[in-house]
Amino acid sequence: MKPLFLLSAFSISRTVWGTSWIVPGAVWYDTAGQKIDAHGGGVVQRGSTWYWVGYSASDSETDDRGTEDQTPLMYQSTDLVNWENLGKQAPSVTGMWRPKFASPNGSSFWLYGQQDRNVLSLSSSQFVGGYSQKAKGLLPPNKYSYSDTGMFLDEATNVWYLLTSADHNTVQINKINSDGSIGSLASTLTKGAYEAPGILESDGIYFLIVSGKTGYRANANQAFWATSPAGPWTGPSDVAPPAEKTYNSQNTYEFAVAGSQATTYVYMGDAWDSKGTEASNYVWLPVAVDAKAKKVTLQYHAMWKVDPVTGVVSYPATRKRYAAAEAEMSGRDGVVVPMAADRCFGGDENVCAAAATTDSDNNIKQQRTMVHRLRTGDEVTFRNVTGRFKTPHEWVSVRYTVNDPDAGEAYIKVNDQTTPVNLSEYNSRAGYHHMVPVRLRLDEGDVNTITLGAIGTAGFEMEVEGLELHEDD
Ligand SMILES: *[C@@H]1O[C@H](CO)[C@@H](O)[C@H](O)[C@H]1NC(C)=O
Ligand SMILES: *[C@@H]1O[C@H](CO)[C@@H](O)[C@H](O)[C@H]1NC(C)=O
Ligand SMILES: *[C@@H]1O[C@H](CO)[C@@H](O)[C@H](O)[C@H]1NC(C)=O
């Protein structure tokens, strides 16, 4: 039973811009309805509150994406889903990339990041706000220039470690001294061109997660392991199927939700746009840790959450489904075809394919097994979609696949909207996963019309399975 004040705080945030789910790749809004702007960041827990610090990629002066601020912004949350913007932490500091929080002696508060390929450290006497520059320099002991700040608190020793990717393809791990200065070298990883390091620890095994070096283009991030931050680091192993390119993201940080029933490790990744602007999104996923096999594996889910009290991960139940097979198709080239055998529409994905063939209700079987195959110019229109207008916007999951995400896109129109919006503007997973939740504004009741269309090259095809609405949106 939650205390009453938590319930009322929750309902207040929901009447503003609340959500119940972590949706990797979607545009995430803060409780005031602004896009969350905390890139290359990390999350730390203090009491029952979680704080997310990252850098703002938006330009406060103009909107022209000219000189970006790159200044640390902090958000707070009690549920890891609804985040309130606490503002700039060091308003005079700009050009600071990937800020990470640390508190090396428990009574002063620090942010470490990269500025001009130096380590920039800021500190404050309070946790929120008031940060100012304390030091800036190259990375000891070898005066390496420096990039992609990571941070790890080793709870076994209560020591904070600064993680970096330094020159010469060296990922370097330095202790942070109790006075906040960068201390001795703990270990290095020199097994390849890696950057964007983060560490998680489970059962005495330390996993160092790193990305490859491909700029803002996603690559297959990998993990190494050791029995202490002092290394040596063994590996690599894949954190996800390599073709998924870490679900189009780059590692920035790992944190644990140590609950009463489970400890859930969370991977925080950045889904960069092509230039790393504020249009970039976030991919957070639970991490399965197999300390015996020395493997960490990202568990991809289009929508999920972790209970910050119990540590238990859950997923939304489906409230309603609208099968493409029952919707109207228009255009020249669209056809109704059987759904691919490894695909399904609705239900538990692992049992759905089996259910589709064994279902005695022909109608349901039909809905589950037929799709609309669209080409550029074709549309499928779903009528009488039930909106709740409980929140300003609700999640609608678009179930579809494309033959080539580089060849085109799905677009969407809701009700009297005349200009279609490409799904990638709502969710950077569009085209890369068969379930793409987008936040739409629906009217209350069975009155909404949603149109999906295909736009792309001559060879582009998409197969639309349908739409899903969720129980707790
Ligand atoms: C923690 O570090 C700060 C900054 O160096 C220093 O001012 C403060 O005295 C330290 N506190 C303790 C308890 O060591
Ligand atoms: C939508 O996607 C199509 C296909 O990739 C692209 O040609 C078009 O420019 C996009 N529209 C917008 C507004 O970005
Ligand atoms: C279906 O939606 C239309 C508007 O598109 C509305 O006029 C009609 O009343 C709806 N039908 C039902 C059964 O709700």
Image: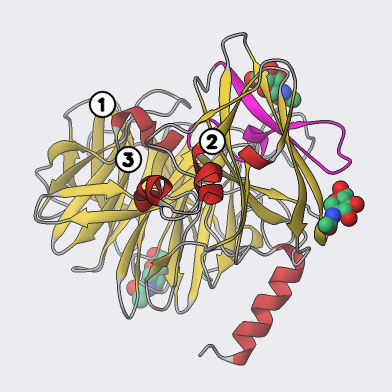
Which residue is at the front of the view, 210 or 368?
368
Residue linked to disc 2? 370
Q: Do the CB atoms of the residues marked 2 and 1 lie less than 8 Å apart?
A: no
Tag 1: amino acid: Asn
Q: Residue at x 30, y 72 (%)?
A: 262
CA gap between label 3 and label 1 equals 10 Å
Question: For residue 38, which numbered disc appears in the image?
Answer: none
Q: Work out whether mark 3 precedes mark 1 in sequence or the reverse, and give the earlier one.
A: 3
Q: Quadrant of the C terminus?
A: bottom right
User: What segment carries the magenta color?
Assistant: 407-433
Quadrant of residue 81 within the rendered picture: bottom right
Q: Residue at x 81, y 62 (%)?
A: 445
Q: Is residue 408 above or below residue 425?
A: above
Query: Which is nearer the N-term, disc 2 or disc 3?
Result: 3
Residue 12 position, x and y percent, is 73, 76
In the image, what residue occupies the spot 43% across and 50% down? 301
Mark 1 sits on what residue?
169
Q: Tell whether 232 sits left or right of 26.
A: left
Figure quadrant, ligand 1: bottom left
User: Is residue 135 in sight in this rendering?
Assistant: no
Q: Position of residue 2 (x, y in %)?
A: 53, 88
Gap between marks 2 and 1, in whole Å?
50 Å
At numbered mark 2, what does the secondary structure look like: helix, strand or loop? strand
Q: Secondary structure at mark 1?
A: loop
Which residue is denoted by mark 3 in the rendering?
A: 164
- Identify which residue, 271 or 73, lies in the foreground: 271
For marks 2 and 3, give the CA distance.
50 Å
